[in-house]
Each structure stands twice: as structure tokens, then as C-alpha cells.
Image (tube, helix red, strand yellow):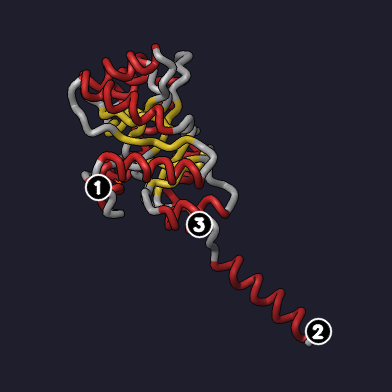
């Protein structure tokens, strides 16, 4: 399972990258706004800064919702760095644009996926990644993890190259559940990644080992 961090915060990206387990970064306009990044050239420079920290794929989202606009924006974003993946919303013009990008060798991440049908459509258009939002489905009393399982079952029947990127992951159990299903990638906040390392028995065990050592070696 590839681990992406879902943030535009450079410090958090550095921290996750320093662990040695980071495979990429996903961003969205809300995450960019949270960091106060505004204006086309600042936004583009921020994507380049992210690409200079992490070795893997970096999703950069278009804000256009019409076919021509998505193509224009996506081509500019893709030219910024070889690791940029153009993030396109799941709308009819987005599907058309994904098909176009796919024919031009530009990699895409189809975002805002909330149903298996949307995932199937994006895969048929040639999306590199599809991003079903696990946490946001849970927020409306629908199992996000069940959607990952449905999409995995559908993709297992065919030979799509599209990777399932479990997005809107909020906590460690989302990561575990998605990994058990076989999602190719997960993206979540640094807190969800770091929480995977924690167990009270690990902390207690280490404390005892160090205390026993200190008894004879101090
Ligand atoms: O980047 C898309 C997705 O991961 C958003 O997550 O927590 O805002 O629902 P969240």
C-alpha cells in the first residue's frame, strides 16, 4: 500500500518524508487555502516546492469545471514537474478531460468519488488514480470502507490500470480497513500516519526494558 499525505503544509510533508515511508502527496484547493497559498503563480510554485521535498506523485487540483478550462489548467500543472498528477473532479467534463489527458500521457487523479459507478466511469476514461472519500461518506452515515470494497470487487473483474486511492482517510482504522481490502494507496493527515505507530503495550514494554537496563548499568 502506498502512503500519501493529504496536506499542503510543507513542514508536515517534510516530517512524513523523513520517516522514509512517504510515497506521495495529495492536495486540494481547501488544503492550499488553509496554508494561505493564493494566486496562480504562488500556487504553482507551492506545487514545485512540494515536488522538491517528496520523491513520489503529487496531486495538483484544477479549479475549472468546463472541459477546455480543465485541459488548459491541467497541461500547465503537468508541465510544472514530472511527478505532478492532475486532479480532476468527477463531473462529465472531467471524465472527458481525463480521457484526453490519458491519450496525451498526462496522469490524473479523479477526485470526489462517492459511488462505484463514478469509479467505474473514471477507470474507463483512463484515470491513473480514483479518489473515493472514505471519511466524508462516514460523515453522512454511509460506510466509506464499504465503497472501497465495492470498487475493489469491480476492478478485480477487469484489467484497469487505475489505482484505488482511498482519500479522506481520517484515522488509523481507516488505513487498516482499506489495506485489508487492498486499496492501492491511502491519503490522510500526518496524525493518521503517526497513530499507526502507537500502542500502549509498546510504550510500557520499552519503559520496562530501559528501566531494567538502567538498574544494572547506571
Ligand atoms: O484531498 C481529498 C480528501 O482527502 C479530503 O479529506 O478529510 O477533507 O474529507 P477530508
Label 2 to label 1: alpha-carbon separation? 56 Å
Given this view, does label 2 or label 3 mark the residue nearer the observer?
3
Q: Which residue is mark 3?
A: 15
Q: How many marks?
A: 3
In the drawing, does residue 36 fall left or right of residue 17?
Answer: left
Mark toward the start of the polypeptide (3 vs 1):
3
- Kindly tell me whether mark 1's CB lies below 8 Å from ligand 1: no
Q: Which residue is mark 1?
A: 38
The x, y position of residue 157, in whole percent, is 45, 15
- Identify the residue shown where x is 36% and y is 29%: 86
- Identify the residue shown where x is 65% and y is 70%: 205
Q: Nearer the viewer, residue 37 or 61?
A: 37
Q: Secondary structure at mark 1?
A: loop
Given this view, does label 3 or label 1 mark the residue nearer the observer?
1
Number of residues whose C-alpha sits closer than 10 Å to that of mark 3, classed few (under 14), some (14–19) or many (20 or more) = few
Label 2 to label 3: alpha-carbon separation? 34 Å
Mark toward the start of the polypeptide (2 vs 3):
3
The x, y position of residue 24, in whole percent, is 48, 40
Given this view, does label 2 or label 1 mark the residue nearer the observer?
1
Mark toward the start of the polypeptide (2 vs 1):
1
Displayed quadrant of residue 123: top left
- Kindly tell me whether mark 3's CB lies below 8 Å from ligand 1: no
Number of residues whose C-alpha sits closer than 10 Å to that of mark 2, classed few (under 14), some (14–19) or many (20 or more) = few
The x, y position of residue 21, in whole percent, is 57, 47
Q: Which residue is mark 2?
A: 217
Residue 177 visible in the displayed image = no
Mark 2 touches mark 3? (CB < 8 Å): no
Q: Secondary structure at mark 3?
A: helix
- Identify the residue shown where x is 50% and y is 57%: 15
User: Which label is found at residue 126?
Assistant: none
Residue 63 visible in the displayed image = yes
Q: Nearer the viewer, residue 150 or 124?
A: 124
Amino acid at each position: 500500500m502506498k502512503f500519501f499525505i493529504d496536506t499542503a503544509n510543507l513542514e508536515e510533508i517534510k516530517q512524513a518524508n523523513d520517516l522514509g515511508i512517504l510515497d506521495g502527496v495529495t492536495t486540494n484547493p481547501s488544503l492550499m487555502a488553509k496554508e494561505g497559498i493564493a494566486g496562480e503563480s504562488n500556487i504553482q510554485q507551492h506545487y514545485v516546492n512540494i515536488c522538491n521535498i517528496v520523491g513520489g506523485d503529487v496531486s495538483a487540483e484544477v479549479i475549472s469545471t468546463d472541459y477546455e478550462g480543465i485541459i488548459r489548467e491541467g497541461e500547465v500543472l503537468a508541465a510544472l514537474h514530472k511527478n505532478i498528477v492532475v486532479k480532476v473532479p468527477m463531473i462529465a467534463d472531467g471524465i472527458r478531460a481525463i480521457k484526453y489527458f490519458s491519450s496525451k500521457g498526462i496522469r490524473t487523479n479523479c477526485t470526489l468519488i462517492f459511488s462505484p459507478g463514478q469509479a467505474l466511469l473514471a477507470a474507463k476514461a483512463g484515470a491513473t488514480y480514483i479518489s473515493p472519500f472514505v471519511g466524508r461518506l462516514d460523515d453522512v452515515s454511509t460506510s466509506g470502507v464499504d465503497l472501497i470494497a465495492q470498487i475493489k470487487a469491480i476492478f478485480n473483474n477487469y484489467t484497469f490500470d487505475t489505482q484505488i486511492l482511498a482519500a479522506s482517510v481520517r484515522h488509523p482504522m481507516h488505513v487498516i480497513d482499506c489495506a485489508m481490502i487492498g486499496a492501492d494507496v491511502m491519503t490522510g493527515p500526518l496524525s493518521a500516519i503517526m497513530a499507526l505507530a502507537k500502542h500502549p503495550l509498546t510504550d510500557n514494554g520499552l519503559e520496562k526494558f530501559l528501566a531494567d537496563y538502567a538498574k544494572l548499568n547506571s
